[in-house]
Image (cartoon, helix red, strand yellow):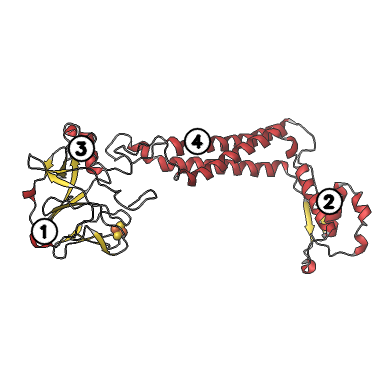
Amino acid sequence: MSSGNGPEQRPSDEQLAGMSREELVRLGARLDGVEIVNYPEPWPVKDTKAEKRAQRVIALWFVLATLAGLAFLGALIWWPSEYVPPSDEGHSLYSLYTPALGITLGVSVLALSIGILLYTKRFVPNELAVQQRTDNMGEGSAEIDRKTIVAQLADSGERSTIARRSMIKRTAGLGAGVLGLGTVALPVAGFIKDPWDDPNSPDSLLHTGWMQEYPGEIVYLRRNTGNSEEISLVRPEDLDAGAMETVFPFRESERDDPHALSVALKRGDNPVMLIRLRTNDAEAVVKRQGQEDFNYGTYYAYSKICTHVGCPASLYEQQTNRLLCPCHQSQFDMLQYAKPVFGPATRALPQLPITVHTDGYFIARHDFVEPIGPAYWERKS
Ligand code: FES
């Protein structure tokens, strides 16, 4: 609002106090050099069928926004988001998780926007006005300007008839509320811990497929031959000095279960590197405190998941006894409990405690004693 017009157009404080809102609106327009050419009522005849129909259409858009917002919240909470391999049942549903979130949130935003646009078009008066621009000489607004602008805003609100359109107010409030809840839930959901989560479950982030599912269970080291149903266990004599082999867990209870055999080869935290050091190199090994008996002679087993951001770190250089992660070139010294000696990784690769069973095959003595892969917020090591 400008106060740049002549003082002769300005009413006194007493006159101002006695003016109706409509008079204040017109005064405000005049002071701003605005000429209202046309100021029609959108619905001059109240409660016509057309008006009610317009109201119902707008309410329908807000209801759609509410339903889509609820669907978004439902998908965020209940849609199966855990990875399912393409060969397994449930993969299609899993692969639709992200599209389901995107579509429901998108429809909710779109429907709410269309409802607001339609309301503005159908119920807010569209006056035709011409205004001269002024810069107000850098001064703040005078009392008269503040009062007239408030009157204009209140007048617009009243002329939009929003106050008496409870159906639109309720549906719009519901749609906006649910959408707001969804947009808050989206970033917050990742930080909420599942209260039913069992930290001792094999599926917990604290455990891998190497965890014994009952005391005394034998978990063998198994190689991947390309056929998940072919069980090929590993014996010490299978590896030459200086050789490395990637191994996965195998338990007898899974022998006749193709699904479990396949999952054991695909589960992200299962791959382990079994390394046989050369005898001379093995004499120089520095073991990690508390893990002095995790190796079997010159055989050492480490998680293959890089502790930087989780790539498979599997380029083993026999001459230097270093393991290279191809993603960002972290190097781990296999003669010093796989601690990082170059690159962005800051944590040693977790070591799997191994031994040889009475039948001559390698087995894991128990699960890793620390989380594998990149750090996460509950990691204590
Ligand atoms: S993931 Fe291995 S260095 Fe980055």
The answer to whether 208 appears left or right of 74 in the picture is: left
What label does residue 261 carry, if any?
A: 3
What label does residue 25 carry, if any?
A: 2
Amino acid under disc 2: Val
The answer to whether 130 appears left or right of 189 in the picture is: right
Q: From the viewer's side, name the closer residue of 241 and 44.
A: 241
Q: From the viewer's side, name the closer residue of 118 and 345.
A: 345
Please provide percent x and percent y for residue 278.
9, 59
Amino acid under disc 1: Gly
List the residue tagged with mark 4.
71
Mark 3–mark 1 Cα distance, whole angstroms, equals: 29 Å
What label does residue 242 carry, if any?
A: 1
The first of marks 4 and 3 along the sequence is 4
Mark 3 CB in 8 Å range of ligand 1? no
Mark 4–mark 2 Cα distance, whole angstroms, equals: 44 Å
- Report ligand 1 position as a quadrant: bottom left
Q: Rate crowding at label 3 as few (under 14), some (14 to 19) or many (20 or more) other CA atoms within 10 Å.
A: many
Image point (13%, 39%), residue name: 231
Please say if 32 is above or below 40: below
